[in-house]
Amino acid sequence: MPIRARGRRNLAPVAFVAPFLSLFALFFVLPIGYAVHQSLMGVERTGPLGLGGTRDVFVGLHNYGRALSEGAFVHSILRVLLFAAVQVPVMILLSTALALLLDTASARGVRFFRTAYFLPYGVPGVIASILWGFLYVPGVSPLVDLLDATGIHLDLLGGTTVLWSIVNIVTWEFAGYNMLVIVAQLRTIPGELYEAARIDGATGWQTVRHVKRPLLRPALVLTTVFTLIGTLQLFAEPLVLKPVSTSIGSTYTPNLSAYNEAFTNNDYNLAAAEAVLLALAAFVLSFGFLRLINRRSQDT
């Protein structure tokens, strides 16, 4: 083969992936790099009383120290970790249960229930938060009025309950999406395995436990990682509920804290440092989970 033809053949794969790599670098790599750069910079004022102007100076890890020294930001990280510890298991268990129900349901009702379960995912997070906000506000919510009529006086937007109210919103939004991922995995299981289980006298629960559950592992790992990352990025729901709940402050979640520092306090460098710290936390938790899962699979 001529050298020129061989070179064209070697460049063909590069030409196919070049558009993706260009967009990936433009909309993913460069923004991350700029955020890291901003987190390492600071604003220095010059002249008497700082009225001579401003200039950007390199401050190293100073902004990270400022972020970690603020108790409100640290508490917001702990709050979303508690949120994840509750919401991730609830999400995965509910999505798996819905997927298994659809997998065993009759053909007549599968399409309807699959659409009904997935429909909340099509509602934007802001709209979903507004809808649920009406169901949480006393005097407006029929749900609160019904609880009051039964003698249960519950403030769904109070300091001890608002976090779990947000858990309900997020679960309602994304359970249908995760369900479809698990249903897709169920569809890949060969029917011969089910037939063999029936011949061996396995019950429905035994089939789920010994056939479906082990083969659902890739989908469960994927949905768990996506859910974990999503919970750490909690933003729209508390932001929408903030005007109707005195328990939600401007630093209720790390994303809210970074948003407040950037667009209220105009401290973009501190906001960038908080955003990078949140990204690092998501990276450590997600890859730590994947490593734990891989280690367990190797041990078994």
Image (cartoon, rainbow, N blue to C red):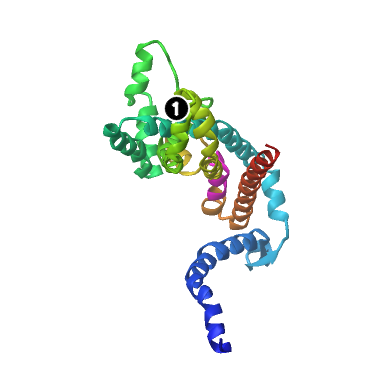
Q: Residue at x 39, y 28 (%)?
A: 136
Q: Residues within 10 Å of mark 1 (few under 14, many from 20)?
A: some
Please tell me which residue lies in front, 200 or 43: 200
* Figure quadrant of the C terminus: top right
Q: Quadrant of residue 73?
A: top right
Q: In the rendered image, which quarter contains the N terminus?
A: bottom right
Where does the magenta region start and end? 250-259
Q: Is residue 84 above or below residue 229?
A: above
Residue 28 within the segment the image draws in magenta: no
Q: How many marks?
A: 1
Horizontal side of 259 relative to 280 (left or right) equals left
Q: Residue at x 39, y 43 (%)?
A: 126
Q: Residue at x 50, y 64 (%)?
A: 27
Residue 190, position as x, y percentages in the image: 45, 41
> What is the magenta segment's predominant secondary structure?
helix
| x then y, percent, for residue 77 | 62, 40
User: Callout 1, which amino acid?
Assistant: Arg
Q: Which residue is mark 1?
A: 198
